[in-house]
C-alpha cells in the first residue's frame, strides 16, 4: 500500500513536471499556488488526520514565516537560504511556544485555544505597524536566485515549488509510517489506551504540533516569494479555515488527500469568484456537502468505491 502510494505520487509529480511548462500563465500560477497551499494542508493533516487534533491556528505559523522572509529580503537583502532558515526557525519556535499552551487542552477547548493563539498573531501583524507595516503589509518581495538559477520567471518557480512539495510529502510520508507516526494514530484512536501501553501521549502530541507548525512555515516561506506581498490577510482566520477545509475535502489522515483538497479549493475559489461575489457561500456549501455525503473526503470516497 505504501509503495503504491509512493509510485502514484511520483507519477503525479512527473506528470505535473511535464505538463507545467506548456500551461498558460494563469493556470500555471494557480497550480503553483495549489502546490504551496498543499504543503500547508499536509502540515495540518499531521495534527488533524493522524493525531486527531483540529487546529484553527495554522495561519499563524504560515504567516510568521512569510513575514520573516518578506522583512529580511526587502529590508536586509538576505538570500533564499537565510530567509528560509529564519522563516522555518520562527515558525518552529512559535509552534513550540503555542504547543505548550494548547496541548494541555482537549477537544473543543484545544480548537478554541489554537483559534485564540492564531488571532494573537493576526493582531500583531495588524497592530505592530513599525515592524509589519500594519494593514499595508510588506510588498516588493522579489523571487530569489537558487545558485545561478533565477526563480523570477513563472516556470522555474513552479518547478521549485513542485520540488518543495515533493520533499514535504516524502518527509511527512516517512514520518507517519514510522513508529512515531503509528503512535500518533494510536493516540487518535484512544489516548487512555496509549497511556496504558506506556506511551508519553503529551510528548507525542507536542512533537506533532511542532512538526506541523514547521511544515506550515515552509509553506509560508514559499508563499512570500510567490505572492511578493505579505499582509494581515495571510494570517487571518480564513486562511486557517481554508486549510481545514482542504484537509476535510481531500480526506484526513492520507496526506495525498489534503494536497488534492488544496488543488480543488484553489481552482474552485479562483474560478467561482470570477462569476459571483458570494463564492464563500459556495465553499461553505461544498464543505457541508462533503461532511454529509463524503465524510472521509475525496480519497475516502474513492477507497470506498474500490472496495
Image (tube, rainbow, N blue to C red):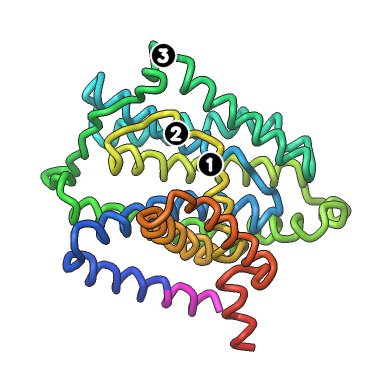
**Are the residues tagged 1 and 2 within 8 Å (C-beta)?**
yes
Residue at the (45%, 39%) spot, across then down: 217
Depth order, front residue of 177/102: 102
**Label 1 vs 2, first from the N-terminus:** 2
Between residue 65 and residue 182, name the one nearer to us: 65
User: The residue tagged with tag 3: helix, strand or loop?
Assistant: helix
Measure how far apart labels 1 and 2 are at the Cα level. Answer: 8 Å
Decide which of tag 3 and tag 2 comes sooner along the chain.
Answer: 3
Q: Which residue is mark 3?
A: 129
Q: Is-magenta flag for residue 6?
A: yes
251 versus 57 height, above or below: below
Residue 167 showing in the rendered view: no
x and y percentages locating residue 223 in the rendered image: 35, 42
- Of the 4 image quadrants, the one containing the N terminus is bottom right
Residue 62 in sight in this render: yes
Task: Give the image location of residue 15, x and y in percent.
Answer: 29, 74
Residue 41, placed above or below residue 294: above
Q: Secondary structure at mark 2?
A: helix
Identify the residue position indicated by label 2 in the image.
Answer: 233
Q: Few, some or many C-alpha atoms within 10 Å of disc 2 (few <14, some 14-19, many ≥20)?
A: some
Residues drawn in magenta: 1-8
**Viewer-proximal residue, 205 or 240?**
240
Q: CA distance from mark 3 to mark 2?
A: 15 Å
Q: Earlier in the sequence, mark 1 or mark 3?
A: 3
Percent x, y of residue 7 = 42, 77
Question: Disc 1 on helix, strand or loop?
Answer: helix
What kind of secondary structure does the magenta stretch mostly adopt? helix
Label 1 belongs to which residue?
238
Q: Is residue 11 left or right of residue 258?
A: left
x and y, in percent, of residue 180 in the image = 65, 55
Q: Identify the residue at image location x=49%, y=34%.
A: 235
Amino acid at each position: 500500500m505504501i509503495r503504491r502510494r509512493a509510485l502514484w505520487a511520483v507519477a503525479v509529480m512527473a506528470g505535473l513536471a511535464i505538463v507545467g511548462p506548456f500551461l498558460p500563465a494563469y493556470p500555471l500560477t494557480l497550480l503553483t499556488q495549489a502546490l504551496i497551499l498543499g504543503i500547508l494542508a499536509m502540515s495540518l493533516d499531521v495534527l488533524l488526520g493522524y493525531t486527531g487534533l483540529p487546529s484553527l491556528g495554522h495561519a499563524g505559523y504560515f504567516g510568521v514565516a512569510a513575514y520573516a522572509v518578506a522583512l529580511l529580503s526587502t529590508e536586509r537583502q538576505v538570500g533564499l537560504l537565510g530567509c528560509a532558515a529564519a522563516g522555518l526557525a520562527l515558525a518552529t519556535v512559535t509552534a513550540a511556544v503555542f504547543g505548550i499552551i494548547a496541548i494541555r487542552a482537549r477537544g473543543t477547548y484545544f480548537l478554541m485555544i489554537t483559534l485564540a493563539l492564531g488571532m494573537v498573531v493576526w493582531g500583531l501583524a495588524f497592530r505592530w505597524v513599525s515592524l509589519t507595516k500594519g494593514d499595508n503589509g510588506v510588498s516588493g518581495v522579489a523571487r530569489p536566485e537558487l545558485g545561478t538559477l533565477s526563480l523570477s520567471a513563472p516556470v522555474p518557480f513552479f518547478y521549485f515549488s513542485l520540488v518543495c512539495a515533493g520533499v514535504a510529502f516524502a518527509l511527512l510520508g516517512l514520518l507517519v509510517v514510522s513508529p512515531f507516526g503509528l503512535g500518533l494514530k494510536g493516540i487518535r484512536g484512544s489516548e487512555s489506551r496509549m497511556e496504558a501501553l506506556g506511551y508519553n501521549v503529551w510528548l507525542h502530541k507536542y512533537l506533532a504540533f511542532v512538526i506541523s507548525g514547521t511544515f506550515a512555515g515552509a509553506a509560508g516561506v514559499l508563499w512570500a516569494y510567490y505572492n511578493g506581498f505579505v499582509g494581515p490577510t495571510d494570517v487571518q482566520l480564513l486562511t486557517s479555515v481554508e486549510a481545514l477545509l482542504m484537509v476535510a475535502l481531500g480526506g484526513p489522515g492520507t496526506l495525498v488527500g489534503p494536497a488534492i483538497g488544496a488543488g480543488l479549493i484553489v481552482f474552485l475559489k479562483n474560478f467561482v469568484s470570477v462569476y459571483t461575489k458570494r463564492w464563500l457561500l459556495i465553499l461553505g456549501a461544498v464543505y457541508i456537502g462533503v461532511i454529509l455525503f463524503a465524510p472521509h473526503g475525496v480519497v475516502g470516497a474513492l477507497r470506498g468505491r474500490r472496495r
